[in-house]
Amino acid sequence: MKALITGINGFVGPHLKQHLINNGFEVFGTDISNGELVDYSVDLLDKQAVYDLISKITPDFIFHLAAQSSVKLSFIKSELTREINVTGTKNLLDAVKSLIPDSKILVVGSADVYGIPDETPLTENSKLNPISPYGESKLEQEKLALNYGLNLVISRSFTHTGPGQKPIFVCSDFAKQIVEIEKGKEAVINVGNIDVRRDFTDVRDMVRAYLLALEKCNFNEVYNICSGNTYSLRKILDMLLAMSDKEIQIKEDPTKLRKKDILLMEGDNSKFIEITGWKAEISLEQTLKDLLDYWRKNIN
């Protein structure tokens, strides 16, 4: 069985590749930039290049991770965010429909399509009201994908973290700052609003869910993928600080505050669990320890 991962250079790609290899897949990776995981460097906005890629690989499974996934950056580059997340997806699905319509495709979406919830926990039937250009692009991506009639599953993935995540995301940002302090930087950690609560999942649990989604879920349906456990960013930070022997001051940084923020995002994963049997296995403590250790190995 052949699997294609788009956006393999991102946070999730390396973890997903290893999981697929462990399950007997021949894995091909594509990204806009080169790298040791990239078999084909392709810009998804280049329609002919995408067509040529699908024609060459003819994958059985496609995991569409490629995206502009930073909420903060989406406010700065809203049109680019839409182009990558919507037009890039359209080019991929057009090629699949033309060349390999029987393949299975996971379109990795986001819980940001819900926006500020008027109920918790969020189910797949909850109101959709995104408050960022990123969330808007992901909702448009969903609607687009569901119109193709392909063997396609959409994940509404909630917050996930773990080793290898870029520090533009909050848990990795905290961990990186702590390690920099351990290595001699001033003992002050800069934070945004740490009272918001999020539903956290380890990336290694998330990639297990992604494979199960294509193996067991109903096509042309949407599934929340999340642990069902929410934590405040204050709790996350306290846990990370307890894993370091440094005395560290916490300082609010106005540049890290969002004009609009979702104070609580808690997911109901019962639909996904019922059909796949998946559950989160890696504890938050282990996730955060591994994240700290990642930065300890990667900051000189």
Image: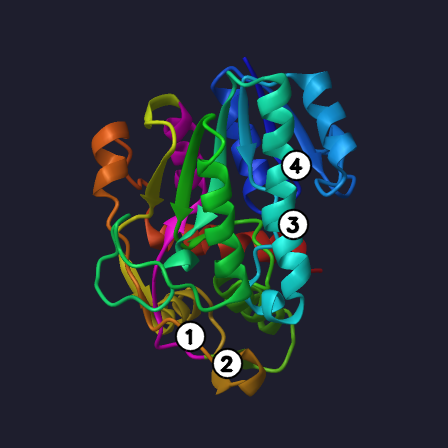
Instruction: Tell me which segment is drawn in magenta.
Output: 193-214
Of residues 29 and 102, which is closer to you in this image?
Answer: 102
For disc 3, the marked residue is 84
Q: CA distance from mark 2 to mark 1?
A: 8 Å
Who is closer to the viewer here, 191 or 267? Answer: 267
Residue 5 figure quarter: top right
Q: Quadrant of residue 271?
A: top left
- Disc 4/disc 3 C-alpha distance (Å): 10 Å
N-terminal of the two: label 3 or label 2? 3
Query: Which circle marks residue 91 in the picture?
Result: 4
User: Dividing the image into 4 quarters, which one contains the C terminus?
Assistant: bottom right
Which numbered circle lies on residue 257? 2
Q: Is residue 155 visible?
A: yes
Residues at badges 1 and 4 in contact (C-beta under 8 Å)?
Answer: no
Q: Residue 13 at x, y = what percent?
A: 58, 38
User: Residue at point 59% right, 37% down?
Assistant: 14
**Cα distance between the residues tagged 4 and 2:** 35 Å
